[in-house]
Amino acid sequence: MEHVGQEQVQAPGQKTIARILAVVFSLLIIGMVLVVFLQVVNRYFLNNPLSWTEEVARILFIWITFLGTYWAMSINAHIGVSSFMVMFSRRVTMFTATVVRWLLVFYLVYFFAIGVDLVRESHHTLTPALNIPFSYVYAVMPISAALMLWLLAADLWRSGRRQVILAALVAAAVLIGLRLAFGGDQIGGGALILVAVICLIVMIVIHTPIAFAMGLSALLFLILQNRIPLMIVPSRMVGGVDSFPLLAVPFFILAGELMNTGGITQRLVNLAKILVGHIRGGLGMAVVVAEYFFSGISGSTVADVSAIGSLLIPAMKKAGYTPEHSVAIVSSASAMGILVPPCVSMVVLGCMTGISIGTLFMAGFVPAVVLALCIMALVYYQALHSDLPVEPRPTLKAAVKSLFDGVIPLLLPVIIFGGILTGIATATEVSVIAVIYGFLVGTFLYREIKPRDIVPILIRTTTMTGTVMFLIAAASVLSWVFATNQVPKKIGEIIMFASTSPWVFLVLTNVVFILLGAALEGLPALIILIPIFIPLVNQFGVNPVHFGILVVAALGIGTFLPPVGMGMFIACNFAGIDIGRAARSFWPFLSVLFLGLLIISFVPWFTLILPSLFFK
């Protein structure tokens, strides 16, 4: 699993467009932050709520999502599965990539045309608060589609003419063949669902970005069925992201970027070393503790493994840990860290299921401790049977300094949960407070965020937001297609027929989400599977919050599952080793992670104790 492509896609005039969009992104994100912060101030401090702030924030969010999708394509940041194509020759891989580009052209041409129709039809319908035409909201869809088509056209132009023509013929033959074989009223919905699923799998295997694979599969189903207007595609996509709670996603991403750039990671690592560094295997344990701290700030597993790995893998190698052992410890700690809120997956899960995001946040703390203790026990056991040095005890002066440096960033989770638990603000409103806090700490207290860092931080935030939210938008259409054809119900009947035991259901949930979390990465697996599994939760009598935490934990483990887990690739990159070497050292850690997952599966108390205390 990795981001699609290795080289940045270039198109004529792209540098000029990039400079313009950098300004646009900065203004959109800063505007969204200020609008939501204004809402918080007016509602809770001035007792004068404004009616228009939420609508403005959601419109800005929609524009950031689709423009961010274009930017993510321009730097090849969309998530795709590369594990299968590496088995083929470079010539086959390049030809397949050209076929994929033509499939994306097909999808985006439809996307552009339908988007234009949606803009035209919505021009005379006004938004509730601002009373502006909805066409201003939807206009970003054809604009982003046109920009992405421009990128693809430039990329195809630079490819070999013979390869481009042959790839176009192959893509056209596939699409026409599907239309001739399965188009028309004589083909039932069940058969077309199977065709859509097979197309989805094939496109993922040939390294199509997952978001576009889902969108194209849903579009193919609608074209082949020819009963539902294609206008449902853009309207469902906008509906999938037009949610005020989902604004917490870019805000937590931005807060993590600010805190990481602002020198927070090193200070948290130093604090972790002070706490456990002097114990046998203490440096390995410090990785786990530092990850627990940092996850409470970043909200992103990729950010966690990148920040902690870049700092501690070189230090562990220097202290006598083998590179593969270092990767194994960092990977297992980062797999655990997804449970420590704030967590982007929890925000998305809460929005999809209606489960309180604050409750999910609170429920993650104790299960994360369970997994952390399992990892630290294994680190200690391995340290006893090896010749690893013990770190010296810190001096009182060093301990006090590290404690002071670490308390300031750790106040961020306190602010987040203080706001949620006291009811002062929603998760979205608290997340924007976290952005303000991260900016103030990094800029004025630590003075490590410079003016030149602001625009790159905002662009990285936009890119990650576009990547995540376009996944949600595309999956919203595919999930709707599945739901209208009763796919979740049919799969539920199969699972219920196999077993009526809730424990069997939970184990099955763990295994499925670990495997698909590895194959598809966390969020795509979450978005595809949750609509299928959530109706079964009540049938099996499982607490939805408990189920949600298990899903998040399983996805975290799957992200580092060899040989395809994206997180493992990132950690191996910092150690300078291949994933095969790291996998041998990771299997014991994978075993204790799965053991910890079973413990929190069969003992719901670990998950539900804090929500029961604070959310009565």
Image (cartoon, grey):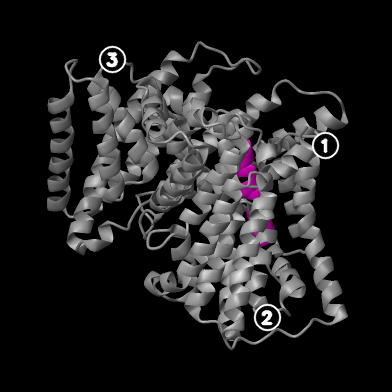
Residue 468: x, y in percent?
50, 43
Q: Is residue 257 magenta?
A: yes
Image position, residue 153 (x, y; %):
28, 44
Quadrant of the rendering where the C terminus is positioned: top right
- Residue at 43 percent across and 64 percent down: it is 569
* Numbered tag placed on residue 280 in the rendering: 2
Residue 227, numbered circle: 3
The residue at 37%/71% (across/down) is 580
Q: Position of residue 134 (x, y in %)?
A: 52, 19
Quarter residue 82 falls in: bottom left
Lateral position of residue 270 relative to residue 544, left or right: right
Q: Which residue is denoted by mark 1 in the rendering?
A: 422
Residue at the extreme top: 124
Query: Which segment is the magenta one?
Result: 247-261
- Asked whether disc 3 touches disc 1, contact meaning CB atoms under 8 Å apart, the reply is no
Name the amino acid type tagged 3: Arg
The first of marks 2 and 3 along the sequence is 3
Measure how far apart labels 2 and 3 are at the Cα level. Answer: 66 Å
Alpha carbon of mark 2 to alpha carbon of mark 1: how far? 40 Å
| Residue at 21% over, 61% down | 88
Residue 34 in the image: state x and y as whole percent. Answer: 72, 37
Q: Quadrant of the N terminus?
A: bottom left
Classify mark 3: residues with Cα within 10 Å, few (<14), some (14-19) or many (20+). Answer: few
Magenta span: predominant SS is helix
